[in-house]
Image (cartoon, rainbow, N blue to C red):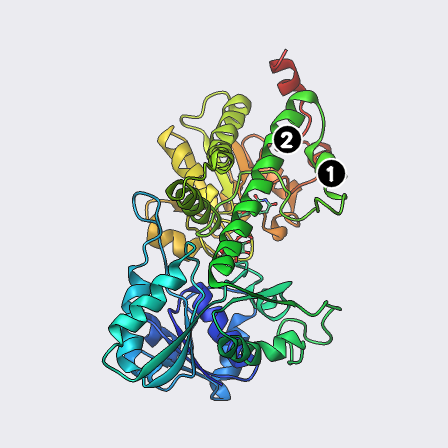
C-alpha cells in the first residue's frame, strides 16, 4: 500500500521504516528541510538500535522515500499517518497546531477517499477535531476522509522490536472501511510474517498481537491512560523505595516480591532517579489537564508527578550526605540520556541532576555512550569526557544516572584507583552493592538498606 508518514521525528521514522520493512511503499515528509536532506544522504537524525539497518535496506530496495514537499508527499498516498510533534503549551495543554497545518495540506491535495491516521499522542477528541478540520479545509473538493486513531506504544531504544512484535494494535475508527484498510496495512505484523530485522535468526515465540478496534475517543484515551499508568507504577516503586531505605529493607527484593504477582508484574517497576523523556512526563501533564477540563480530578496523577519531581532532590541530598559539602567537589556523572539505548536527553533526569549540582558549585564531568553529541548541542557548557574512566579520574563522587548495561561491565577496580575518593551514588540501582563494597567503594543506591540512613531516621 502507498503510505505517507508526515513528521520525521522519532515516531515518524520508526513508523515509516517499519511499514517499509513489512512491504509497503513509504514516503516520509517533514517541514524541516535539513532533516529530509539528512535522510536523503542516508543518515538517520536519531539513534535507535536497528533502525539504521531497516532504513538502509528499504532505501536500497526502493520502498522508502523522502520528500520535502508535503503536498507532493501526500498527493498519491492511500493512507497518511500523522506523526508530528504535539509539544506542551505553557499551560500544559498539547499544542495541536502542527496537526492542524498537516490537515490543511492533506485537504487541499485530496481527490476521492483518503485514510488519515493520527499517530501522534493527542488528547481525546483530537480525532474529531481533525475530521472537522479536513472537511472544512477540503469542502471545495470532491474529497472523503476516513479518520482513524492508531496510537503507538513504542519505547525509545527498542522501538523497532516494539513495532514488529507489539502486545496489541489499537485502531480507533468510525467505519468498517477504515478498519479494513488498517487491518490490511498491519496484516504482516498481525500474522507475524516478515523477515525480522531485530532477531537475525529466529524470533522468540511471540503471541500474535491483539487487534483492538475501538472508537476514536477510546483509542486516544488508551494511549494517555497507558503512559500515565506506567508513570504511576514507577512513582509508586520510588515511594516504596524511600520507605524501604528508612526501614532497612531492600527495594530490589521488595519489588521483585511484589511484581512476581502476575496481577502486578515486574516491568516498569524499578526505583531510581525517576522517569524522564519526551513522553511520560508530558503525557502525564496533558492527561491531568484533560481531566481538569472535563471535571475529573486527577489528584492521583498530580501526586505521581510530584513524587517524580522530588527524585532529583533526594539524590542531591544523598550526595550531600555522603560528600558533606557539594561546592568544589568533582563529580563524575555516568549517563546523560533519559534512559539506556537512546541518545535522547529531553527531560532527562541526568541533565537536571547535572544542572542542580553545577548550580550548587560542583565540578561535574559527564559521560554517556550515545548522548554526548546531543548534549554538546543543548548544553555546550558541560564538561564531557570521552569515556567513563576519563570522567572518573580524580572524582570525589561518581553518580550513575542512566541504566546503561555497559556501565556494569566497567573495570571498577581501575576506576577506584583513579578516583580521589571511591564513592558511588547509584541512581539506577545498576550495580551490585556487595561487589562494590568488596572492591572498597562506599556505595549508596536507591531504597537499599544503608546504616547511615537508618541512624539518621532515629
Ligand atoms: C514511553 C512508553 O513506555 C511507550 O509505551 C510510549 O509509546 C512512549 O512513551 C510514547 O508515548 O511515545 P519512552 O518515552 O521511550 O516510552 O520511555 P520509557 O521506556 O517509558 O521510559 C521512561 C522513563 O522511565 C525513563 O526515564 C526510564 O529510565 C524510566 N523508568 C522506566 C524508570 O524509572 N523505572 C522503570 O521501571 C521503567
Residue 430 against residue 328 in the figure, above or below: below
Question: Which residue is the site of mark 1?
Answer: 258
- Residue 216 visible in rendering: yes
Q: Residue at x 56, y 37 (%)?
A: 235
Q: Nearer the viewer, residue 137 or 317?
A: 137
Beta carbon of the mark 2 residue lies under 8 A of ligand 1: no
Kind of element beneath mark 2:
helix
Asked whether the residues under the numbered discs 2 and 1 touch, taking CB atoms below 8 Å apart as contact, a structural biologist would say yes
Q: 10 Å neighbourhood of mark 1: few (<14), some, or many (≥20)?
A: some
Q: Residue at x 26, y 79 (%)?
A: 108
Q: Quadrant of residue 261?
A: top right
Please indicate whether residue 210 sits to the left or right of residue 291 in the image: right
Kind of element beneath mark 1:
helix
Residue 309 against residue 4 in the figure, above or below: above
Q: Quadrant of residue 104?
A: bottom left
Question: Which residue is the site of mark 2?
Answer: 240
Amino acid at each position: 500500500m502507498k503510505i505517507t508518514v508526515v513528521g520525521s521525528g522519532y515516531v515518524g521514522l520508526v513508523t515509516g521504516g517499519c511499514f517499509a520493512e513489512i512491504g509497503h511503499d513509504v514516503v516520509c515528509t517533514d517541514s524541516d528541510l535539513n532533516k529530509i536532506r539528512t535522510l536523503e544522504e542516508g543518515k538517520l537524525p536519531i539513534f535507535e538500535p536497528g533502525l539504521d539497518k531497516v532504513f538502509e535496506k528499504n532505501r536500497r530496495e526502493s520502498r522508502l522515500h523522502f520528500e520535502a514537499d508535503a503536498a507532493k508527499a501526500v498527493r498519491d498516498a492511500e493512507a497518511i499517518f500523522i506523526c508530528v510533534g504535539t509539544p506542551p503549551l505553557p499551560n500544559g495543554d498539547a499544542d495541536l497546531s502542527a496537526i492542524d497545518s498537516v490537515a490543511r495540506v492533506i485537504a487541499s491535495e485530496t481527490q476521492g477517499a483518503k485514510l488519515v491516521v493520527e499517530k501522534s499522542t493527542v488528547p481525546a477528541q483530537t480525532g474529531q477535531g481533525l475530521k472537522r478540520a479536513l472537511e472544512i479545509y477540503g469542502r471545495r473538493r470532491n474529497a472523503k476522509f476516513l479518520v482513524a486513531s492508531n496510537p503507538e506504544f513504542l519505547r525509545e531504544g527498542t522501538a523497532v522490536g516494539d513495532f514488529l512484535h507489539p502486545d496489541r494494535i489499537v485502531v480507533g475508527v468510525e467505519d468498517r472501511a477504515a478498519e479494513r484498510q488498517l487491518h490490511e496495512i498491519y496484516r504482516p505484523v498481525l500474522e507475524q510474517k516478515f523477515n525480522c530485522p531485530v532477531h537475525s535468526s529466529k524470533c522468540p515465540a511471540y503471541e500474535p498481537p491483539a487487534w483492538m478496534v475501538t472508537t476514536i475517543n477510546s483509542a486516544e484515551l488508551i494511549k494517555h491512560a497507558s503512559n500515565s499508568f506506567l508513570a504511576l507504577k514507577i512513582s509508586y516503586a520510588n515511594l516504596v523505595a524511600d520507605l524501604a531505605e528508612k526501614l532497612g529493607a531492600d527495594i530490589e527484593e521488595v519489588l521483585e516480591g511484589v511484581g512476581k504477582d502476575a496481577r502486578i508484574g515486574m516491568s516498569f517497576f524499578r526505583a531510581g532517579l525517576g522517569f524522564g523523556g519526551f513522553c511520560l512526563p508530558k503525557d502525564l501533564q496533558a492527561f491531568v489537564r484533560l481531566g481538569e477540563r472535563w471535571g475529573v480530578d486527577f489528584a492521583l496523577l498530580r501526586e505521581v508527578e510530584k513524587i517524580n519531581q522530588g527524585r532529583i532532590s533526594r539524590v542531591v541530598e544523598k550526595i550531600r550526605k555522603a560528600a558533606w559539602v557539594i561546592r568544589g567537589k568533582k563529580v563524575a556523572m555516568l549517563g546523560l540520556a533519559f534512559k539506556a539505548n537512546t541518545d535522547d536527553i529531553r527531560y532527562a533526569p541526568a541533565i537536571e541532576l547535572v544542572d542542580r549540582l553545577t548550580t550548587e558549585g560542583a565540578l561535574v564531568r559527564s559521560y554517556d555512550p550515545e548522548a554526548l553529541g546531543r548534549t554538546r548541542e543543548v548544553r555546550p557548557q558541560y564538561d564531557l569526557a570521552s569515556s567513563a574512566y576519563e570522567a572518573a579520574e580524580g572524582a570525589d563522587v561518581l553518580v550513575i544516572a542512566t541504566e546503561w548495561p555497559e556501565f556494569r561491565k566497567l573495570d571498577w577496580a581501575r576506576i577506584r584507583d583513579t578516583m580521589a575518593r571511591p564513592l558511588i551514588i547509584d541512581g539506577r540501582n545498576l550495580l551490585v552493592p556487595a561487589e562494590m563494597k568488596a572492591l572498597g567503594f562506599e556505595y549508596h543506591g536507591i531504597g537499599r538498606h544503608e546504616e547511615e540512613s537508618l541512624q539518621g531516621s532515629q
